[in-house]
Amino acid sequence: MKFSKVRIVGLTLLIGFLSLSCQNTQPSGPLPGLGGAAINSYVAVGNSLTAGYQSGALFASAQIYSYPNLIAQQIAIAGGATGSFQQPIYSDPGNPDPATGKAARLELLTWHDPKTGQPLIGPRGLAPGTPTNLALKTPYNNLGVPGAVLFDFLDTTNFGLKALPPRSNPLFLLILRDPKLGNSMFQQTVNMKPDLVTFWLGNNDVLGFATSGGTSGTVSPPAPTPAAGFAQLYGASIGALRAALPKAKILVATIPDVNSIPFFTTIGPKIAQELAAAGGYPLVYQSHSAPGVPTIMASHLTGPNAPLITLTGSSAAGYIGHPTGFLYAGGPLPPGIDTTRPFGLDPANPWPDALVLDSVEQAQVSQAVVAYNGTIRAVAAADNAVVVDINAFFQRVKSSGYRVSGQTFTADYISGPNGETSPFSFDGIHPNSQGEAVLANQFIGAMNSAFGMSIPLVDVARVPSLPVPLNKGGRVYPVIPPGAFDDLPMLWGVR
């Protein structure tokens, strides 16, 4: 069968149209462009959120969707020379858990745990991956160092020392690698001579305290970084960047409050529901609201001042009401604990303080976040930086959801009650790949608005969600075995 010349031309035009329609451009908006500016080098400064850390680990198939890498790709579409954006990639299945030597990445292990009937999430026990581009002759463009606090940006302490106790964080050596490339995060940034810098540090200055339930242990800070100290460090950091890079475009991001992430909002409602069904019992828990011996408190886990139960307590939830001491296995019982009493219902066997953020601790966290974000805005105004309000965006996602590319995103863990999508990964703290795309678009939108650019947004629908569908009948309340989060303490070790 022969095609006429007209039909061949028509088919060619159709193929061309379909090809263009698959681009990450905005067909009804302006043509992609940088508003006359040149962006030949882009450096992203941050912590695990910037690194593309997902589901408790660094691994290549997630890192390629880090929000800085997505931003770099979109800038390249708009005419920038950022197509060779370099990251410290860890091959799948990712970095090892320091406690086990196995890959730390959390995955869905089974939909139906025989003990609980709930989805079981944890590491598979796989051999870890390896770093793939340590021989790069320049600093990485992505200087997101999992575990970095604000202090680390200007600190010139030997990177190897941060891989040792008390920090015990080998990822400083992985990412910063060689002092000859720059003896600090700041110096490595400056040595890349970037035209664009995104700066998102400060999350770990409050998150470490919060994820430990406000307890002061060997791997958790005793309190959020004091507001005055944060202000001094932030002013010095952005001031140094501006002085060294007077013409660079600098964007800084605010710090989200922990009340908007599923690490703190997933397990409490499930426990409250089960206690109410069992007869309206309150959860009896320890609190360090007062100095000295933990105070015993009780709550139905409802209302505006209810304690927040951490995701690390998911495995303990199934033991409430049972005489058990499984949380203390392998170690001595704390003073006053009687494991023959019903766990979580009796003052002698209470829910432990490390698995709950009480109202006083929540207030400490919120006060720190408010102070930090006030500092970020003030310093940005003084040093000609653009603020990307990630805190306000996360609060919006929590309160009313966020709809993009035909999907509704909520702050639920994995999936919402009506099939909505979560932007968070299995660890309940870090975004999944689609969440990274959503974050990238917040930065791109800020750049377009502030600098008169037309950088196309990432098409979120073309970015993979979690690797398995988890929408099976509404909210997912997982079981995560003890030890599955062993990799996370290095993200906010004692400083």
Image: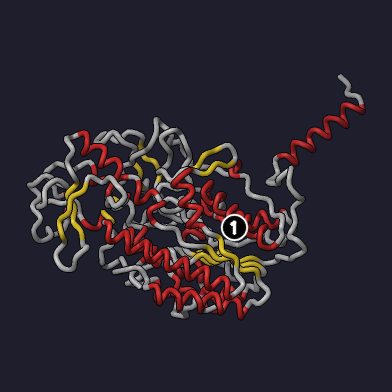
Quadrant location of residue 381? bottom right
Residue farthest top in this picture: 1
State the count of labels: 1
Task: Return the x and y of residue 101 as percentages of the image width and height.
Answer: 36, 57
| Left or right, residue 358 beside residue 492 | left
Specify whether residue 129 is in view: no
Task: Return the x and y of residue 34 as percentages of the image width and height.
Answer: 73, 60
Q: 155 and 392: which one is in front?
A: 392
Q: Residue at x 25, y 41 (%)?
A: 272
Quadrant location of residue 473? top left
Q: Quadrant of the C terminus?
A: bottom left
Residue farthest right in this picture: 5
Q: Which residue is drawn at 47% across and 52% down?
A: 394
Q: 297 and 17: which one is in front?
A: 297
Task: Return the x and y of residue 342 as percentages of the image width and height.
Answer: 11, 44
| Left or right, residue 227 beside residue 310 | right
* Secondary structure type for disc 1: helix
| Left or right, residue 288 beside residue 61 | left
Task: Return the x and y of residue 328 as percentages of the image width and height.
Answer: 17, 54
Q: 357 and 82: which one is in front?
A: 357
Q: Quadrant of the N terminus?
A: top right
Q: Look at mark 1 in the image and give the residue it sits on.
A: 443
Specify whether residue 252 is in view: yes
Q: How crowded is mark 1: few (under 14 residues within 10 Å), some or many (20 or more)?
A: many
Relative height, residue 218 to residue 480 (above, below): below
Relative height, residue 332 to residue 244 (above, below): above
| Left or right, residue 1 beside residue 99 | right
Q: 409 and 121: which one is in front?
A: 409
Q: Residue at x 53, y 49 (%)?
A: 61
Which three-letter amino acid code belongs to the residue tagged 1? Phe
Residue farthest front in this picture: 304
Q: Which residue is drawn at 8% across and 52% down?
A: 338
